[in-house]
Image: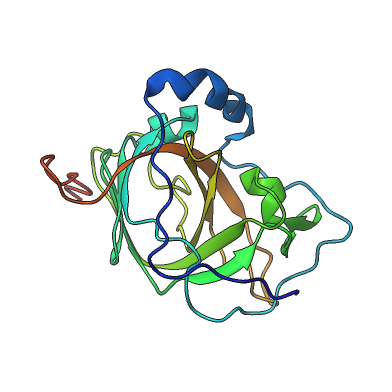
Amino acid sequence: MTESVVPGPDHRPARHAALAVLGAAALLLTGCSVLGGGAAADDAAPTARPEPGSAVDFRGRYTPLSNTAMAFTGAIEIDDAGLTAAKGLRYALGAPETVYGRDGYPSGSGDARFADVLLIAPDTPVTLRAVDSEQVGADAPNGGLCREGETRYIALAETGTASQATLQLAAFSRDPLSAGETPALCGTFNYFDAGDVGGDAGPLSGATGE
């Protein structure tokens, strides 16, 4: 894999414009799905394990944009420890690793690229984080990000423009970079960037109940 310059740790995705961006971002909705598969790419190959670290600081709050995000998570908050969703989900996440849209992973229909799954440019950085633990509350209407299955990895990427930034999230039931596994893509979810962690708003509820 060709090495690329990774921005420093202080990089923060640009804040999205007000709801006026809904019209432009609506084009993304058709690319958001659950229990889908990555598009095959002849020139994609499984990527070697990258060095730890993230090219983008994703800490903050996000408003659902795609239908799947609205149905499965509602608003989400990402911090150093993991991801909390308003609809009863909590994911403790491992250390970030960075790959790029051009990088490939094996899929059931042949090698796929992260760019195809997340609808991003080939040179866009993608942050992978292993799921250390998954809590699905009794009030979660559709189960976890992999429905009844176990969510093992999530992939995060920023797309859009400086005034229309969005978060692209993909959930996998297996490690997408493991040579011994064929990762299952559970679904893709899209969000608006809604602001930093903290502020006047209270924390999201996360998983509750058994």
Q: Where is residue 91 in the image (x, y as percent from the top left)?
A: 33, 58
Can you tell which quarter of the image residue 126 is in? Answer: bottom right
Task: Say which residue appears at 43% left-offset and 37% top-offset.
Answer: 191
Side of 209 where 108 appears, left or right: right
Judge whether residue 175 can be spotted in this image: no
Count up the numbered dots. 0
Above or below: residue 165 compared with residue 66: below
Q: Where is residue 106 in the image (x, y as percent from the top left)?
A: 74, 63
Above or below: residue 8 compared with residue 186: below
Q: Which of 150 and 14 is in front in this view?
A: 14
Q: Where is residue 170 in the image (x, y as percent from the top left)?
A: 54, 50
Q: Which of 199 and 206 is in front in this view?
A: 199
Q: Nearer the viewer, residue 179 or 159?
A: 159
Q: Quick one: quadrant of the N terminus? A: bottom right
Judge whether residue 118 can be spotted in this image: yes
Q: Where is residue 108 in the image (x, y as percent from the top left)?
A: 75, 55
Above or below: residue 28 compared with residue 104: above
Task: Say which residue appears at 39% left-offset and 37% top-offset.
Answer: 72
Task: Say which residue appears at 64% left-offset and 75% top-offset.
Answer: 178
Query: How does the figure colour the protein chain or chains?
Result: rainbow
Task: Say which residue appears at 80% left-offset and 52% top-offset.
Answer: 109
